[in-house]
């Protein structure tokens, strides 16, 4: 019985380690070519990565992982993005151009739900025996579709037999906020390491 309890605690510890590893954002920024179904980048100094799965990720992902698919002569790499549940990015390139070390100019769809959190002191409030200045947190969602002006995509590994595609990307462009003001954006350190399985088992 004692040995069984040690064995069980070891299994639980291993699952916890796997889960913590998967839930650790830094995992998404390691450049690999092993089919980990990850995609990440830096957007104007903010780290952005593919949507995290819930539960025990290896067995019960709640959302599809970053992936690629072949469609109408193209290869499309796509991913949902973290903490912005309607955010999405995809790259489309001609399948016959995808070779290792290829430098490509992809067609890009990039959109996200922006949730800024801005804290400030509100107008003083008074009542019987007190005066207070409340801390107000404005949290206004803005759905933004970004206009990509330039983009590059470099293939690091393309293994059709293993169904593994990995590479790097950069982008520049602009978007308008809710007031109509135009902002520029730059994407650097883009990395993807994906398979064609949206719900991988490992």
Image (tube, rainbow, N blue to C red):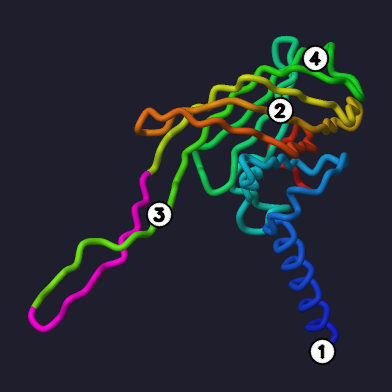
Q: Do labels 3 and 4 touch, CB within 8 Å?
A: no
In this rendering, position of residue 192 left or right of residue 84: right
Judged left or right of residue 6, residue 129 is left
Span colored in magenta: 128-140
Per the image, the residue denoted by label 4 is 95
- The picture places residue 6, in percent across and down from the top left corner, at 82, 83
Q: Nearer the viewer, mark 4 or mark 1?
A: 4
* Mark 1 element type: helix
Q: Circle 2 sits in a helix, a strand or a loop, which is it?
A: strand
Whole-angstrom CA distance, mark 4 to mark 1, is 56 Å
Expressed as whole percent of the image width and height from the top left, the position of residue 120 reads 34, 60
- Quarter residue 200 falls in: top right
The residue identified by callout 1 is 2
Name the residue: 80% across, 38% down.
Answer: 193
**Alpha-carbon distance for marks 3 and 4?**
44 Å
Residue that carries the numbered disc 3 in the rendered image: 118
Say which of 139 and 45 sits in front.
45
Q: Position of residue 78 (x, y in %)?
A: 66, 30
Residue drawn at (63%, 50%) of the image: 52
């Amino acid at each position: 019985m004692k040995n069984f309890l040690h064995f069980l605690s070891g299994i639980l510890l291993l699952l916890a380690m796997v889960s913590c590893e998967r839930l650790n954002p830094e995992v998404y920024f390691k450049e690999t070519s092993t089919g980990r179904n990850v995609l990440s980048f830096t957007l104007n100094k903010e780290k952005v990565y593919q949507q995290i799965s819930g539960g025990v990720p290896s067995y019960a992902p709640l959302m599809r992982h970053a992936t690629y698919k072949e469609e109408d002569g193209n290869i499309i790499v796509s991913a949902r993005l973290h903490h912005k549940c309607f955010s999405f990015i995809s790259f489309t390139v001609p399948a016959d151009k995808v070779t290792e070390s290829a430098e490509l100019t992809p067609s890009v769809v990039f959109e996200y739900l922006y949730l800024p959190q801005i804290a400030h002191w509100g107008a003083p409030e008074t009542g019987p025996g007190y005066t207070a200045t409340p801390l107000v947190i404005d949290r206004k969602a803005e759905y933004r579709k970004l206009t990509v002006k330039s983009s590059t995509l470099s293939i690091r590994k393309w293994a059709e037999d293993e169904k593994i595609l990995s590479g790097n990307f950069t982008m520049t462009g602009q978007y308008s906020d809710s007031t109509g003001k135009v902002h520029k954006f730059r994407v650097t350190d883009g990395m993807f390491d994906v398979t064609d399985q949206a719900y991988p088992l490992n």
